[in-house]
Image: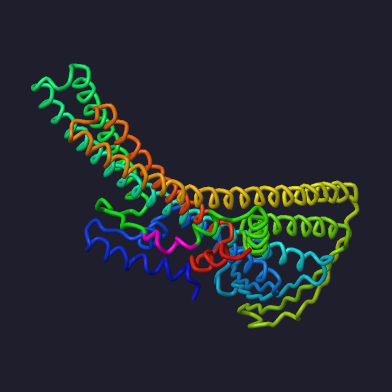
Amino acid sequence: MDRRFVLLILGILFCASVFAEGKNLSLEQARTLALSNSRSLAKYNLAARAGVLDERSRLYGNLPSLSLGASASASLRDPEGTPQDNLLDAFNAGASVSVSQKIFEGGKTLVLKAINAINAEMARKDALAEYFNVLDSADSAYYAALEAAVNLEEAESALETAALSLSIAELRRQSGMIGPGDYLKAQADKEARETSRNQARRNLALNTAKLKSLTGMDETPRPETVDFGKYEETILRLAAISDEGADALYAKFWETLAAKNPGLAKAGLSGAKAEKDLSLAKRDYSPSLSASFSTGINYTRLNGPETSPGRLSLSGSIPLDYWVTANNVEKSRIARDSAALDYLEAENSLEMELRSALLDAIAEAGSVVSSRRAWEYAKKHFEYIMELYRLSRGSVTELSDASALAGSSRSQLVRAQYGFLQALSKLRSLGTIEDEKELIRLLGES
């Protein structure tokens, strides 16, 4: 069974488990809930189903057309105009059955069948693209909520440091160890940290609300922490990749995208449809031929039931307004050429999207490595300055700067980590790669 449909089915089961757990929400649950809650995806799925029905309609249109008819009448007057004494004597009833079949239309039937099949496949590609768009949205909302939570944690820590610094500054001011300037600096720093903490709370609430709306949960979700350890090998490899390795990686991904990307596939289908439309327009030069057969039974009181002889008829038509057909053919040829240009444009756009996503992944991987080292150094620097401050050998300004450096270093690390995950989500959508292990495997090749 297709994994996408399995996810949609499991969405209902996950809903019950999520609500039972309260606020806890895993990334896989968020994705599944987002898929089951997406109205846009539901509309695309309905369009795909409608495309299948259109395809069936064309198939049914190629079958013989059957019809039944019935009639009943009674004359109120005889041929001389005298009222009938008995209406039953003038009663007349009949029934008929007819069958008609198109024999030749210049090949239009096969072309129309192919066009409907292309339309149905295009609708499925649209639904597939929207499926991965929803997954991207779920990932983005999930990571944004986690990043906001970490930023709030850092803001709370910075506020605690500023409050501690202010309390120590108050004692030193009372003892005359520092002047009013340092004390005012500690007060300002504490208020600024509180403002940052309040802003971080607001960001967390907003991002959590977005995640809640996307998943359709009744309760406020609490995203579970992502295990970055499983990405460590990939991060280190991409951070150290050479230009030649990046080019080889791009070529490897392009093979997958060229075969599976729904946007590019739809552009190709549009070109094929335009070619069929041109072929269909040319068929209007051809004559058409159809046949029909009808028979029936008629009943009157005087003669009883009488079977009418079967009647077979053939009809054909030859178009003479060739100038109209020629005009339509030229319009279809222009549409075909335009579709070919659209395909080239879609291919170029996809190439740029892939290159951008890969460069983002490589850049974010490098940022993870460097910002992780920066945070380690900033933490040690902060601990050193804090100890000096406790021993009255450091100033309020030095402690504030060290705290700010540690906080910004951690924020950069968190931003790089989730930026890397976002880049992975983008690569997954471009290549319609559902299995994360397969995506990691591709990133490990060059």
Identify the image quadrant of the C terminus: bottom right
Q: Nearer the viewer, residue 114 or 205?
A: 205
Above or below residue 33? Residue 161 is: above
Residues shaded magenta = 227-233
* Left or right: 164, with 46 as reference point: left
Taking 49 as reference, is 97 left or right?
right
Q: Residue at x 58, y 63 (%)?
A: 76
Whether residue 128 appears in magenta in the rendering, the answer is no
Where residue 119 appears, as percent x and y from the top left, is 65, 60
Q: Which coloring applies here? A: rainbow
In the rendered structure, the answer to whether residue 68 lies left or right of residue 384 reads right
Q: How many marks?
A: 0
In the image: residue 41, left or right of residue 327: left
Residue at (51, 50) in percent of width and height: 366
Q: Magenta part mainly helix, strand or loop?
A: helix
Residue 243: percent from left, percent from top:
65, 52
Say which of 172 and 197 sits in front.
172
Q: Nearer the viewer, residue 96 or 118?
A: 118
Q: Write down the quadrant of residue 264 in the picture.
A: bottom right
Question: Looking at the image, can residue 127 be seen?
Answer: no
Residue 211: image location, x then y, percent: 35, 49
For residue 367, say whether it is visible. yes
Quadrant of the image occupied by residue 297: bottom right
Image quarter for residue 245? bottom right
Vertical order, 31 against 64 (above or below): above
Task: Say which residue appears at 67% left-offset and 71% top-offset.
Answer: 59
Percent from the top left, x then y, of residue 358? 58, 53
